[in-house]
Image (cartoon, grey):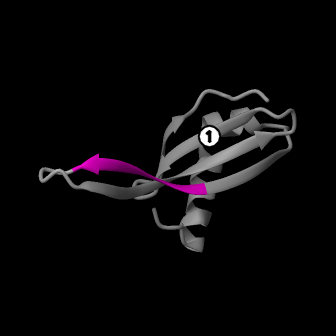
């Protein structure tokens, strides 16, 4: 999977931070943010495996060690899913 461009990284950050549920999760907390590309791996009609790039995953690690992953579609600029928290 290809890396995100700087523009895509900034868009992913802005989309994640503008989501009301994300804002509620991080409200008043210190966190570290990591952004990675996200996509789907599918098998086409001829049996070949293809990677379809379509989004990003923004990970928030809160000061207490709790980690949230926010998955989003860069084309529509919408959050698709917020994964359940991981407690460390």
Q: Is residue 50 left or right of residue 22?
A: left
Residue at x 35%, y 57% (from the top left corner): 51
Residue 16, relative to residue 67: is it above or below?
below
Foreground pick, 52 / 44: 44
Residue stretch in magenta: 36-43
Q: Is residue 22 left or right of residue 71?
A: right
Identify the main secondary structure in magenta.
strand
Which corner quadrant of the image does residue 69 belong to? top right
Quarter of the picture holding the C terminus: top right
Foreground pick, 6 / 47: 47
Q: Are there few (<14), some (14-19), or many (20+) residues within 10 Å of tag 1?
A: many
Q: Is residue 15 left or right of residue 63?
A: left
Location of residue 49 in the rendering, given as x and y in whole percent from the top left corner: 27, 54
Residue at x 69%, y 54% (from the top left corner): 34
Q: Is residue 42 magenta?
A: yes
Residue 7, relative to residue 71: is it above or below?
below
> Hey, which residue is sitting farthest front in the picture?
47
Q: Is residue 11 left or right of residue 31?
A: left
Residue at x 53%, y 67% (from the top left corner): 3
Q: Is residue 56 magenta?
A: no
Foreground pick, 87 / 71: 87
Location of residue 1 in the rendering, given as x and y in whole percent from the top left corner: 45, 62
Location of residue 72 in the rendering, given as x and y in whole percent from the top left corner: 49, 47
Residue at which label 1 appears: 69
Location of residue 4 in the rendering, given as x and y in whole percent from the top left corner: 54, 67
Residue 19, relative to residue 77: is it above or below?
above
Label 1 element class: strand
């Amino acid at each position: 999977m290809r890396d995100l461009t700087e523009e895509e990284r900034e868009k992913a950050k802005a989309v994640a931070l503008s989501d009301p549920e994300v804002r509620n999760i991080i409200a008043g907390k210190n966190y570290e943010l990591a952004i990675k590309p996200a996509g789907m791996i599918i098998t086409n009609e001829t049996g070949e495996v293809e990677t379809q790039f379509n989004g990003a995953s923004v990970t928030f690690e809160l000061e207490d060690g709790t980690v949230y992953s926010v998955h989003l579609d860069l084309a529509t600029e919408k959050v698709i899913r917020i994964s359940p928290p991981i407690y460390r």
